Amino acid sequence: SMPDYQCDNLIKECFNKAKKIGRCGVDNGVTAQLVAAIHVSIEEMVNDISDMKKRGWMGMGLEIPHAGEREMVKEVLTSVSTQQHWMQLTQKSMEALQARVDGL
């Protein structure tokens, strides 16, 4: 276990170091390394997404390799989405009607 004065001193030094970094900024070498690492990661993600798109990836668990089939799947998914939207609106209308009937 650490004595209180030693812990207090460590905390004080951490605050001092944070203030120094806040005033002077981060070392340019560290910044350059971070930017390079981020750039490499973004390039890898773009390549992965491009590969997935070429294979016909349309979403989680949905990979359709042929363009014609992808269009049919898009139409089906759009229809399902539209139906879900209308069903939600119908449900809200029914709830409002039920509330009015219960209020009478």
Image (cartoon, rainbow, N blue to C red):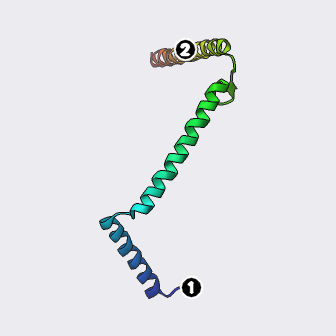
Choose between 39 and 98: the one closer to the eye: 39
Q: Is residue 71 left or right of residue 99?
A: right
Between discs 2 and 1, the one toward the N terminus? 1
Q: Secondary structure at mark 1?
A: loop
Name the image quarter holding the C terminus: top left
Front residue of 96 and 77:
77
> x%, y% of residue 12?
38, 78
Q: Amino acid at mark 1?
A: Ser
Q: Residue at x 50, y 19 (%)?
A: 92
Q: Nearer the viewer, residue 15 or 50?
A: 50
**Residue marked by disc 1:** 1
Q: Position of residue 51 (x, y in %)?
A: 63, 31
Structural distance between the alpha carbons of marks 2 and 1: 64 Å
Residue furthest left as drawn = 23
User: Pointer 2 and pointer 1: residues touching (CB < 8 Å)?
Assistant: no
- Determine crowd level at label 2: few under 14, some 14-19, many 20+ residues with C-alpha closer than 10 A: few
Q: Which residue is mark 2?
A: 82
Q: Can you tell which quarter of the image residue 19 is in?
A: bottom left
Q: Quadrant of the N terminus?
A: bottom right
Where residue 67 appears, x then y in whole percent? Answer: 64, 15
Does 98 appear above or below 53?
above
Q: Residue at x 57, y 17 (%)?
A: 81
Which residue type carries mark 2?
Thr
40 vs 75: above or below: below
Residue drawn at point x = 31 percent, y = 66 percent: 24
Element marked by disc 2: helix
The residue nearer to you, when weighing 85 against 5, is 5
Residue pictured at 55% horizontal, 36% vertical = 46
- Residue 43 percent location from the top left of the image: 54, 41
